[in-house]
Image (cartoon, rainbow, N blue to C red):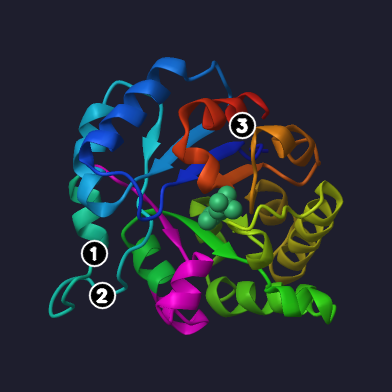
């Protein structure tokens, strides 16, 4: 039985120009600790190709922050799976809360993106998570279950080896407010149970579930110590090499 992998991924969002990207990657590659975890970084699209070249001999994987569901054609301003694959990128973040909130990405659109990425043999890091109002009204489990169901649960069982999940409560992203390690563990266990019900235990056991939302060096170790938390998707703290390295060391 395959054990799920530990993963620490940095989502750089719309930050770092080309020189800054090169500098941060140089520092990261130099300071990268010895780790069993997969380490990933997601620079902006315009810097992906140079990042891939720069990290050619590093174990750090360059991934994309988004992609379009279409294969090619009249989608001005968009990036296809084939374009990513062509420059050596085979993992893509889909469904980040900022894409959902600011760019109108619905569960239906995300389901299409996931389907296209998997058809192209890419790995998908699928993000989801409830908003503050959902948690206040104790609706967070329902919301998460629906997000998973709408985007992922019509996939064949075999597709799940290419899925990484990132639970990111929206109220904890970029706010400095973190879910407590107990809240993260509770939700991650719920996610595994939901996948067990929809598929089976082996899929639920083997999928990596990352936590995201204001992870920093000071809280990473405690969050990562929870049995169902397999790592983190890191925003703000991934932009500072020493912080990102400390978070990798915490896993
Ligand atoms: C994110 O955007 O995926 C994220 C977790 O951001 P932050 O770490 O800044 O909260």
Which residue position is annotated with label 3? 247
Taking the spot 43% from the left edge, 68% from the top edge, the residue there is: 114
Give me the C-alpha separation between circle 3 and circle 2: 35 Å
The answer to whether 153 appears left or right of 197 in the picture is left
Q: Earlier in the sequence, mark 1 or mark 3?
A: 1
Q: Tell me if I can see residue 164 in this picture.
A: no
The answer to whether 37 appears left or right of 171 in the picture is left
Q: Earlier in the sequence, mark 2 or mark 1?
A: 2
Q: For numbered disc 1, what is the local secondary structure?
A: loop
User: Which numbered marker is on residue 186?
Assistant: none
User: Which numbered marker is on residue 70?
Assistant: 2
**Percent position of residue 161, x then y:** 53, 51
Residue 240 lies in magenta, yes or no?
no
Using a 10 Å C-alpha cutoff, classify the residue at mark 2 as few (fewer than 14 neighbours), some (14 to 19) or many (20 or more).
Answer: some
Taking the spot 46% from the left edge, 28% from the top edge, the residue there is: 241
Q: For numbered disc 2, what is the local secondary structure?
A: loop
Quadrant of the image occupied by residue 227? top right
- Segment colored magenta: 88-112
Please tell me which residue lies in front, 62 or 86.
Answer: 62
The answer to whether 57 appears left or right of 98 in the picture is left
Which residue position is annotated with label 1? 80
Callout 2–callout 1 Cβ contact below 8 Å: yes
**Percent position of residue 205, x then y:** 72, 49
């Amino acid at each position: 039985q395959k054990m799920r992998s530990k993963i620490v991924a940095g989502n750089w969002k719309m930050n770092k120009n080309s020189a800054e990207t090169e500098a941060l990657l140089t520092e990261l590659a130099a300071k990268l600790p010895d780790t069993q975890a997969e380490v990933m970084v997601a620079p902006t699209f315009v810097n992906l190709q140079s990042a891939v070249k720069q990290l050619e001999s590093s174990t750090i994987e360059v991934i994309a922050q988004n992609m379009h569901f279409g294969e090619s054609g009249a989608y001005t301003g968009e990036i296809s799976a084939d374009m990513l694959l062509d420059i050596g990128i085979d993992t893509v973040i889909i469904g980040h809360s900022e894409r959902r909130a600011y760019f109108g990405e619905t569960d239906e659109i995300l389901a299409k993106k996931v389907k296209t990425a998997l058809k192209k043999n890419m790995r998908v890091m699928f993000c989801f998570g409830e908003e503050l109002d959902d948690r206040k009204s104790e609706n967070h489990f329902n919301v998460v279950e629906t997000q998973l169901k709408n985007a992922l649960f019509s996939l064949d069982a075999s597709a799940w080896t290419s899925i990484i999940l990132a639970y990111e409560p929206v109220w904890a992203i970029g706010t400095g407010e973190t879910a407590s390690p107990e809240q993260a563990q509770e939700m991650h266990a719920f996610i595994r149970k939901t996948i067990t019900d929809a598929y089976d235990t082996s899929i639920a056991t083997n999928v990596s579930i990352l936590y995201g939302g204001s992870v920093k060096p000071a809280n990473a170790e405690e969050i990562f110590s929870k049995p169902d938390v397999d790592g983190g998707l890191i925003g703000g703290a991934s932009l500072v090499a020493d912080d990102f390295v400390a978070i990798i060391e915490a896993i």
